[in-house]
Amino acid sequence: MLKYQQIANQIEHYIEQHQLQQGSKLPVLETLMENFSSSKSTIIKALDLLEKKGLIFQVRGSGIFVRRKSRRGYINLLSNQGFKKDLEEFDITTEMISLEIVKPTQEAADNLQIAKDQDVYHVKRIRYISGQTLCLEESYYDKSIVTYLNKQIVTESIFDYIREGLGLNIGFSEMYIKTGKLTDEESEYLKLPTADPKLIMESIFFLANGTPFDFSKVTYNHEQSQFFLLGTGL
Amino acid sequence: MLKYQQIANQIEHYIEQHQLQQGSKLPVLETLMENFSSSKSTIIKALDLLEKKGLIFQVRGSGIFVRRKSRRGYINLLSNQGFKKDLEEFDITTEMISLEIVKPTQEAADNLQIAKDQDVYHVKRIRYISGQTLCLEESYYDKSIVTYLNKQIVTESIFDYIREGLGLNIGFSEMYIKTGKLTDEESEYLKLPTADPKLIMESIFFLANGTPFDFSKVTYNHEQSQFFLLGTGL
């Protein structure tokens, strides 16, 4: 972890620990430079990272202020795929339905930009929130990149394993959101009436070098799914 | 507009005009500095802005690459409230249902952080996409900030007016997303069967100084609503 990321983490930790409210003023740049024995450019990078994460806002000539989202119980839309850290405030468990090496569907091959005869890991999971079904997740991982998966990894966190186990650098994602009605299969997994509303999220995850490695389709139980998104720099 | 924003716009324009594909390499930092007769720090700020907007990704030691989302016909979730610019690729029209000065509901007062006896503009609009109903929007603007609105502004773009007419600096937003079933009133406005699925987006918009000025509830027609979101820096 780079120095500016460490500093950003420390400031984030400080905000949480002291339960600072929206609008609370943070020390000025010079004080932060002193406190962290760091250069101006390092502090600026740390603050930009915090701003990007929606944790602070900066008003030119006026100061650095804490941002706090006003509601609890919503899942961060941007980091909900990583799940683990962001969902620590929730009681989430994962059940693996299947894990197999297969040839991709046309849709998966297109989204992963691979040929149809290449191997992929096909993972099907259900997530529960406080014992209720939260979502049904179907993911395809390019096996030439994600070379190994097992039941324990799939039940815990695949992304943690990709980062820490495989040492890969996860870069960015595309996410597509639609609504619709549950199919018979989905309603069975989610224990909801057929044709109930659903939220579908399709995501493509890319390594930092721009190669897609994961295509995932998640169907959410409409009763349990509440998301938030912090917009910056409108 | 600051110099780095101008440069970012020019690079964005260049990418669009030349229809550069995902993975296309942009010139190195030194070349960009020369081309734009700018300092290293200005170019870095321009590139960071483009990265934040999901238009490029930077690979340390390797270069700067173009990002292109793979699907068309989806609305940008983060900028869909501004609507105008982002929806230029769509045929969107707006119909005003009502515009009045009222006292806020408890919910609106809470989200705007104002007292219940303060005045707000209450705006109700329907958006159409290619002649089909897209969404029903109900917004509350703190009248002490958004001091004036009229039918023409409400039918065109309220945010353009707030920025350009009132000279206010729009800062950031909180967005909450839920799904559910249409009420009778909503289904009438959206011309859909009652109890059809809906996507609800509640947003709070803040000035750059952290003051909320707009609380808005948008109910989407599930048949027409497809959103995308570009994640960065996972």
Image (cartoon, coloured by chain):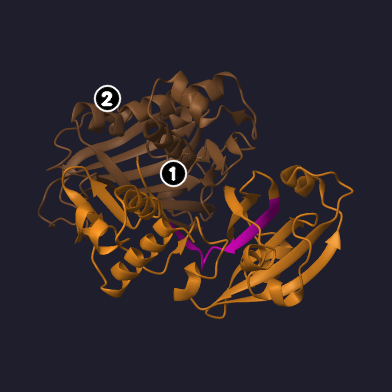
Chain colours: A brown, B orange
Against B90, residue A80 (above or below) is above
Q: Provide the secondary structure element on which disc 2 rests.
A: helix
Q: Closer to the camera, B173 or A121? A: B173
The magenta segment is B213-228
Q: Nearer the viewer, mark 1 or mark 2?
A: 1
What's the residue type where badge 1 is placed?
Answer: Leu
Q: Provide the secondary structure element on which disc 1 rests.
A: loop
Q: CA distance from mark 1 to mark 2?
A: 25 Å
Give me the chain letter of mark 1: A
What's the residue type where badge 2 is placed?
Answer: Gln
> In the picture provided, is A231 more to the left or to the right than B99?
left
Q: Is residue B218 magenta?
A: yes
Label 2: few (<14), some (14–19) or many (≥20) C-alpha neighbours in 10 Å: few
Q: Outermost residue, left direction?
A: A117
Residue drawn 27% across the image and 40% down it: A170
Q: Is residue A82 magenta?
A: no
Against A190, residue B37 (above or below) is below
Asked whether the viewer can see residue A203, the reply is: no
Give me the chain letter of mark 2: A
Residue drawn 43% across the image and 48% down it: A219
Q: Position of residue B58 (x, y in %)?
A: 26, 48
Residue annotated with mark 2: A152
| Marked residue nearer the N-terminal end (1 or 2) | 1
Q: Position of residue B69 (x, y in %)?
A: 32, 61
Residue annotated with mark 1: A78
Q: Quadrant of residue B14?
A: bottom left
Q: Are marks 1 and 2 in contact (CB under 8 Å)?
A: no
